[in-house]
């Protein structure tokens, strides 16, 4: 609801209906509210980076549109949204910068510009870089270098979000541990963001059925999922001094994006609450870990 396509769908037109409700809900429940996201290569309307003839806009035009958008959105919620995913998923799996229109038109400096524009709009807000698969060595190296470079330039990067789109067998606990240690060593806040666990096979794997649990999750898989969450939260708690928050990517299984990715129509069970919004064994397991 704070992505560009939702809040700024057309040139000169903003729609804060859903965003205002989201922030009001967080305030009623005294939550730490996070804005997701200011710069992303997806869910960005075509008009942002192309002119009426479909050609790329000029560097100056895109820079001004970026500044206006960030100043308007962050400024509206100044002092209310406490942290922003300023740039989301700017890296390829090999750690190089993703070839997006932001990079092509503005150059590598678009990242620094986005953070500086956000800081101007709300000097007290925490500002994050957020990405997935940072547990993999090559991408982690690229992200570490990116954050080092930005901070060396005085860019106000407050923290790094490690997207927790996990599987039952990835990342390994050693990978998760080393990623947290590496980013904490930079002196930034570390967050586990977008946490869920995909329990289904993926296309390309040697299985006959990519949607094996249509009728419900077998008890054996429920127990395995609960143990997987236990193992991950054990790592998180080991680094409690470096991790500022853990954020799940959804509330209940029926709401999860993983029901339709990477192929549509799948029945997934990645979260702590089931389709009836009842706590699963994984919920009790996580609570148990935190009380040890």
Image: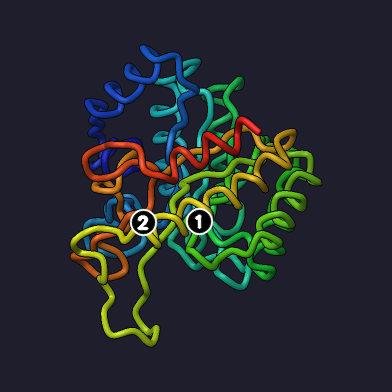
**Residue 276 percent location from the top left of the image:** 21, 40
Q: Position of residue 31 (x, y in %)?
A: 46, 20
**Left or right of residue 156: residue 245:** left
Measured from the top left, where is residue 81 in percent x and y?
Answer: 46, 23
Crowdedness near tag 1: few (<14), some (14–19) or many (≥20) residues, C-alpha within 10 Å: some
What quarter of the picture does the N terminus occupy?
top left
Q: Is residue 264 above or below residue 42?
A: below
> SS class of the residue under badge 2?
loop
Against 80, residue 2 (above or below) is below
Q: Residue at x 53, y 32 (%)?
A: 118
- In the displayed structure, 35 sits above or below 261; it is above
Disc 2 + disc 1, Cβ < 8 Å: yes
Residue on which disc 1 sits:
89
Please tell me whether mark 1 sits on a helix, a strand or a loop: loop
Asked where in the image residue 156 lies, by quadrant, the reply is top right
In three-dimensional space, the C-alpha distance between marks 2 and 1, rounded to whole angstroms, equals: 9 Å
């Amino acid at each position: 609801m704070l992505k560009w396509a939702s809040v700024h769908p057309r040139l000169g037109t903003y729609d804060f209906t859903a965003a205002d409700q989201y922030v009001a809900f967080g305030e009623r429940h005294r939550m730490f509210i996070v804005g997701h996201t200011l710069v992303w290569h997806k869910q960005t309307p075509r008009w942002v980076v192309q002119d009426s003839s479909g050609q790329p806009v000029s560097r100056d035009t895109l820079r001004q549109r970026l500044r206006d958008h960030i100043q308007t959105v962050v400024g509206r919620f100044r002092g209310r949204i406490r942290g922003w995913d300023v740039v989301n998923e700017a890296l390829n799996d090999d750690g190089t910068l993703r070839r997006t229109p932001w990079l092509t038109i503005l150059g590598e400096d678009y990242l620094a510009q986005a953070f500086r524009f956000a800081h101007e709009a709300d000097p007290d807000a925490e500002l994050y870089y957020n990405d997935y698969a940072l547990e993999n060595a090559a991408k982690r190296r690229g992200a570490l270098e990116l954050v080092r470079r930005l901070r060396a330039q005085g860019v106000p990067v407050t923290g790094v979000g490690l997207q927790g789109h996990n599987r039952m067998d990835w990342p390994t606990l050693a990978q998760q541990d080393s990623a947290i240690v590496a980013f904490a060593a930079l002196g930034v806040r570390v967050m586990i963001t977008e946490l869920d666990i995909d329990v289904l096979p993926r296309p390309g794997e040697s299985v006959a059925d990519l949607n094996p649990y249509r009728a419900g999750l077998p008890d054996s898989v429920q127990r395995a999922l609960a143990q997987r969450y236990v193992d991950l939260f054990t790592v998180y708690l080991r680094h409690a001094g470096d991790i500022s928050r853990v954020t799940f990517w959804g509330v209940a299984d029926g709401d999860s994006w993983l029901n339709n990715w990477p192929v549509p129509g799948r029945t997934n069970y990645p979260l702590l609450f089931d389709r009836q919004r009842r706590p699963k064994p994984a919920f009790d397991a996580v609570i148990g870990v935190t009380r040890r």
